[in-house]
Amino acid sequence: MRIISTALLVLCAILTVTAAVFLTVDGNLARITGWYSFKPGMPLFTAENTQRLDSVQWMRIKDLHDTIECSRETDGTWWITHPFRDRLNPTVAATILAFTEKARVVDTLPYNKVTRSRMREYGVQSKPHTITLKAPETPGGNDLTTIARYTLGSASPWLADAGDGKSVIPTTYLRTDFYGKDKRIHVVSGNILSLFREGLLSLRDPRPLLFAPEALREMRIISHQSEGESTVILRRISAETPWNITAPCITAADQDKVNNMAASFVGMTAVKVEDNSQVTPQGELRHTIEFITEGAEPVVMKLYSSFSSAADGQPLCHATVNNRPVVFTLQAEPRVSRKGSYSRIVNSICNLPVLPARSMAQIKSGSGTVYTSELPLSLAELRSLKFSDIIDRDVERVVLRVHDSNDSLKMLLIPGDVENEVNDVWMYALGNQPYAKAEEVVVRRFLNGLSNIPVRGVEADLAPGENYKEFIARYGLDNPFYSLYIRPKSCQYRAMLFGIDLPLVKDRDARIFYISRYKDPATGKFKWVGMERGGNTIYWLSTRLTRTFSLDSNSWRARNLVNFPISALRHLTLGFSQAPLRLTYDYIGESWEGKLGEEDVTPRINPHRAQYYVRQLQKLKVSEWLDKDDEYALHSLQNPVFSVKIDLELTDYSDAEAVVMDSSELDHDSLTPEFGDSRKDKAEDALTERTETDAALRDAALMERSTHRQTITIEVAPSEEASDKPFFYGRVVETGELFIIPFDDAQGLAGSILDM
């Protein structure tokens, strides 16, 4: 009896170990029973296994001719490991995993009806595709266990409910031995047979390059030409910093072009991927591009000259990358010509400031298709054609100085207060004249033009080892016609350190630009050229930019005709052709009194019209300030048709303003080619001046201010010149200043304030 008991125990132990082995390998005991109960509508695999599909790390796909094995690396990329190493198309892996998860049993064919001929008809023998998926046995472990295995047959003629009660999806014949030696054939929802239409070796990733554009730090572009090689090197420190060209010269890169080019390389898709052991790249090597990304090995791509497809004549080209044993066939040029009227229409649409930059780039490239002939791979295409990268809102001081002249233009930004709704104000001064309010639109246009008006071309680059002084002297920039000084705003975030107010971030250094007039020896014509001090590139400037370098006060002066607070208004006299209307305003009581000639018209004054008239007068802007001796304006104003006289009583803040302007004044003599006080001296000066300014402003706020009276008389007359747009000339009688105002604004000055 003991022998029998021992034998039974041994048999039970063997069965237990066998079951454990099958559980470890396949995750189920159906391998022992050889049968699994499938019912229509149930998932092909258990919920426990489908939940582990996200952790699948190994995949094998077999057909009648080939077998490929793939593994997923830690970054999520799938690679073919057998029979060669190459990147798997990520769409293939994602589609297989999705099909495995969502496949539902539609029907099961009875085993006794599955004959050999019918098995060939269902495709499970004649054209099968067997897929095996493995995941870690334990989370984070190295040992893998099979969680799904099945053989795909042919597409079945039935359609299955998609689950929403409205749409249907195709179905596929399928057999799985995951649950044992089960030879039944099932009809399951879904169909992924199109993945294998071109064979297993076509499952390679058609994208030659795979990296995140923001991780890219350097690109080296070597162009192979008959006359020799040329290299362009682009670098950036981080994803937030701009691209710069460091070879063959040091200059700024066109940020949009470089970023779009990097995105184009990542989005590039081959029309064919072939083994390099079977295909030799056709044509001559044109470009070698090296991509260096953060934390990864460099990837080198080679582009060859284009050739015509034998099938349809489409221009194609071959390409290779150093980390994949394949030859890519890329589209070299679009089928539709980019020249002529088509090109003009596309460019016109893309230049409209309506579509996002990426959408416009896709329109230009043909709905996202990347053509190798349209990649900007030369220095001329990649370099920036902007004179500077200055952002107008970051500037606080500007000085424009003219060669051999005592006149200079100084501009200064007086910061506002957002909380108290006080706007920034630009002030300007010419020569030794006092500061006056500048027209902000004109100042912004001037600063904006430095970076947004494209230069006409690049005149010269400083060659490595070339003498800098001789280089700039060749173009007259050692003694420039214009010297432009620009100081960025100081750091707004400050802290007290040892009792001294210091910026938390180092203030940016001032920048100086030189502009000169240069005679081109090749053409004999004069052109404007310019460069930044310390730069390596001399640009041929557009006259659209140089025309903004004006020392005419009328160009910078604020366009507001009058500037006064309504609290200062005492009298307003409107000079009509018959009798003048004289109005008296009480700011405290918000009341009006008036006389038309000798007649008291106070009851007829409409206070709402009067208030509106004053507000419009305060907002009135001239179209253009004129010289005081403009003969056309003086001739028209001999017989003015209307006049406005404003009597004001203004509070005097001139002493406080003088302190502010003096503390903000720039040392004019410091603007030299060797410009630059020490940073320490500048900081000490700024701190001292800031203290004086604050004290002056406190005193100005606390003390009683004196007042003074001011009268402003404006006369207007219609222009006698023939013009499509009629306008009026105007004059400020007290100062003799002449101006032009639009026809409609001049008519508004004669608006009615009295009720009939």
Image (cartoon, grey):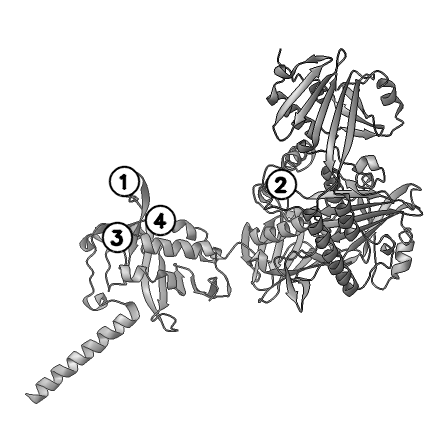
Query: Left or right: 24 with respect to 267?
Result: left
Residue closer to the observer: 344 or 741? 741
Which residue is denoted by mark 3 in the rendering? 186
Q: What residue lies at 91% left-to-right and 51% top-to-bottom?
A: 476
Separation of disc 4 and disc 3 at Cα? Answer: 13 Å
Query: Mark 1: which amino acid?
Result: Gly
Which of labels 4 and 1 is toward the front?
Answer: 1
SS of the residue at dot 1? loop
Check whether the beta carbons of the residues at disc 3 and disc 2 lie within 8 A of each other.
Answer: no
Query: Residue 220 in the image: x percent, y percent?
Result: 69, 60
On the picture, is 147 further left or further right than 369?
A: left
SS for tag 2?
helix
Position in image of residue 241 (x %, y %): 65, 57
Within-10-Å neighbours for mark 4: few <14, some 14–19, many 20+: many
Mark 2–mark 1 Cα distance, whole angstroms, equals: 42 Å
Q: Residues within 10 Å of mark 3 (few under 14, many from 20)?
A: many
Q: Are marks 2 and 1 in contact (CB under 8 Å)?
A: no
Q: Which residue is mark 2?
A: 364
Residue 138 placement (x, y as % from top left): 34, 71
In this rendering, the answer to whether 661 lies above or below 88 is above
The residues bearing labels 1 and 3 have C-alpha atoms spaced at a distance of 22 Å
Amino acid type, residue under disc 4 in the picture:
Asn
- Where does label 4 land, which residue? 191
Amino acid bearing label 2? Lys
